């Protein structure tokens, strides 16, 4: 087994329960870690034998562009789509962070983390 990590994927999205958040948007950071078998690709040096991280980034960016009230909801959509489109992945750890959240305090980020395994 092996791990592929995409760190600090940055998006500007419109998630949140407040009406203002759906209008003005906010900066987000996504960190993705997937478990897969890297033995074949480490020998073959061929992209078809591994998980394409360009596709993973594309899935994250596309799902982050679809508005959700909760970070948990958008994270679940990302995980579901990755499992659907990339059958080689056995586990996902995903963090979605809202940077500078409007919560009435000096908070750098609010982050949710979800870990899911393929059924």
Image (cartoon, rainbow, N blue to C red):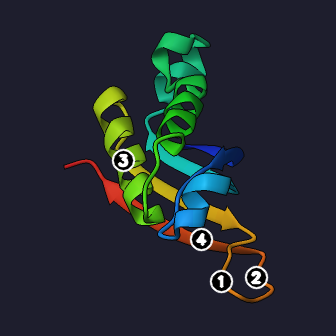
Residue farthest along the bottom direction in this orientation: 105
Q: Which residue is mark 3?
A: 77
Number of the front mark, 1 or 2: 1
Q: Secondary structure at mark 1?
A: loop
Judging by the rendered image, the residue that carries numbered circle 2 is: 107
Which of the pair 32/65 is nearer the observer?
A: 65
In contact (CB < 8 Å): disc 3 and disc 1: no
Name the residue beneath numbered marker 4: 111
Q: Earlier in the sequence, mark 3 or mark 2?
A: 3
- Labels 1 and 2 touching (C-beta < 8 A): yes
Which residue is painted at 60% across and 64% down in the image?
Answer: 20
**Which secondary structure, mark 4?**
strand
Query: Along the horizontal axis of the image, is 77 left or right of 59?
Result: left
Quadrant holding the N terminus = top left
Residue at figure coordinates x 68%, y 76% from the top left: 102
Judge left or right: residue 91 versus residue 32: left
Q: Is residue 56 above or below residue 12?
A: above
Q: Nearer the viewer, mark 1 or mark 4?
A: 1
- x and y percent of residue 86 in the render? 37, 29
Give yes or no for contact between labels 4 and 3 (Cβ–Cβ under 8 Å).
no
Q: Nearer the viewer, mark 3 or mark 1?
A: 1
- Return the residue nearer the eye: 3 or 115: 115
The percent position of residue 28, horizontal first and vertical second, equals: 67, 55
Q: Quadrant of residue 97?
A: bottom right
Q: Residue at x 35, y 37 (%)?
A: 81
Residue 1 in sight in this render: no
């Amino acid at each position: 087994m092996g791990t592929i990590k995409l760190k600090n994927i940055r998006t500007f999205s419109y998630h949140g329960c407040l009406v203002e958040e759906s209008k003005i948007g906010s900066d987000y950071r996504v960190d993705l870690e997937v478990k897969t078998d890297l033995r074949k690709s480490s020998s073959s040096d061929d992209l078809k034998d591994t998980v394409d991280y360009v596709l993973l980034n594309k899935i994250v960016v596309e799902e982050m562009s679809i508005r959700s009230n909760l970070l948990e909801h958008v994270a679940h959509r990302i995980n579901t789509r990755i499992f659907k489109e990339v059958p080689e992945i056995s586990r996902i750890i995903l963090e979605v962070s809202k940077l500078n959240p409007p919560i009435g305090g000096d908070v750098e980020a609010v982050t949710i983390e979800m870990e899911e395994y393929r059924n």
